[in-house]
Image: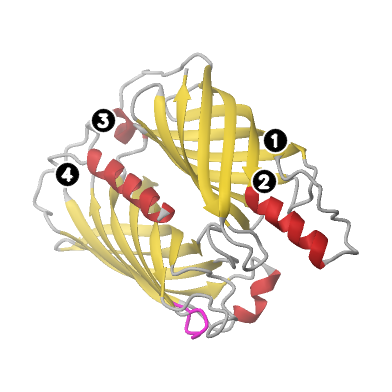
Amino acid sequence: MFRLLLFFLLLSIGFLHAQENETTFIDVQYFTGTLLRHNKNIANLVREHPTGFVLSYNRKTFGEERWQREYNYPDWGLSFLYEDFNYEVLGKNYGLYLHYNFYFLNRHLQFRIAEGVAYNTNPFDIDTNFKNIAYGSSFLASTYLLLNYNHANVLKGVGIQGGIGFVHHSNGSFKAPNSGSNAFSVQLGLQYHLDRGAPIVYKYRDVDLKHSEKIKYNFVVRASYNEGDYYNLGQQPYIVLSAFADKRFSFKNTVQFGAEVFFAKFLEKEIEYISKAFPNSKTKGDEDYKRISVFLGHEFRLDKLGLLTQLGYYVYYPYKYETRGYSRVGVKYYFNEKLFVVGTVKTHAANAEALAFGFGVRL
């Protein structure tokens, strides 16, 4: 459910950015790759080379809004990704995504970032598929990245593209087990412009138009349900309270510094379980499950959309869970200059802790 909410949030943002005079094109790309051993626990799952394809619908932008000019007239669109792991334990993944294409080197280098939801055909089951510790649920959050050489309209609206990619699937520890999967790929494909006769007129970037804001203060509440690394301890409430200052020093870039408190009830269950199941361990059962951290962050702004990256460190860490450092990535949508919603994934190295959604104010 949480992954579906994030996807439809992104989808609605994309439609809000649509323009009347945008031209459209479709593309299809076949890929083959290698499943990465990002976690020692999935070593036995790395058997064959995953294969699949990406089918996409794209709309061009021409600079009607400033963010389009600042980012060199990106495309946005919808894409479908099929991934076959060629190993029955892992099954197959079918995903639906919202994506953006960004262009460099006279529009011959294309970088795509896509976020969406996927369905796995053979998730973990204690009786029938206990080996699949990658996916504890059928519905997954998914991200894919493509870096392509792009040559549009080689012949009568048909173009070519190809390059390297990365595909990630995980349920964000919403349900255990959740080792997830990461695949490196190479792809090759064709594109076709549906309205290649339409005139292409770019609105050029404003000259010397700068953007800077005073320091703003943000307060965010995030919530979710998640499950720890130990199977069958159940899903528990997950709440994060954050306070931070940010400084937007350009149209694209904002930096952040702040602190936050984590109320992760799954850790309370884990502490209780370990103290009883492993009486010789250092866990006594009375450790505090709460944590406090400080963090630094950066945000790319695309009109009302913000793309987040944050790095944090626990200053209050009474129970040792994973590492003291963590990272977070996510997306924000601004209703106005003061109110926003946010969806983020928090990880320790390659291990996801929680996928959470929240509401914030910026004063």
Left of 274 or right of it: where is 299?
Answer: left
**Comes first in the chain, label 1 or label 4:** 4
- CA gap, disc 4 to disc 3? 12 Å
Residue named by callout 2: 326
Residue at numbered disc 1: 293
Measured in 3D between alpha carbons, the distance from the residue under mark 1 to the one under mark 4, in whole angstroms, is 45 Å
For label 2, count other residues whose C-alpha is less than 10 Å away and answer few (under 14), some (14-19) or many (20+). many
Which x, y percent locates residue 164?
46, 64
Residue 305: mark: none
What amino acid does circle 1 point to?
Ser
When asked about the image quadrant of residue 147, the answer is bottom left
Point out the tag, 3 or 1, that comes first from the N-terminus.
3
C-alpha gap between disc 2 and disc 1: 10 Å
Q: Amino acid at mark 2?
A: Tyr
What residue sits right under mark 3 in the picture? 65
x and y percentages locating residue 168 in the rendered image: 50, 62
- Please state if 286 lies on the left or on the right of 90 as rendered: right
Residue 313 vs 258, above or below: the answer is: below
Amino acid type shown at disc 4: Glu
* Mark toward the viewer: 2 or 3: 2
**N-terminal-most mark, 4 or 2:** 4
Residue drawn at x 39%, y 60% is 117
Q: Which residue is tagged 4?
A: 22
Label 3 neighbourhood size at 10 Å, few (<14), some (14-19), many (20+)? some
Please check the rendered image and state whether residue 206 is part of the magenta-colored stretch, yes or no. no
Residue 262: % across, % down: 64, 40
Cα separation, mark 2 vs mark 3, equals 35 Å
Task: Name the mark nearer the viewer: 2 or 1.
Answer: 1
Q: Nearer the viewer, mark 3 or mark 1?
A: 1
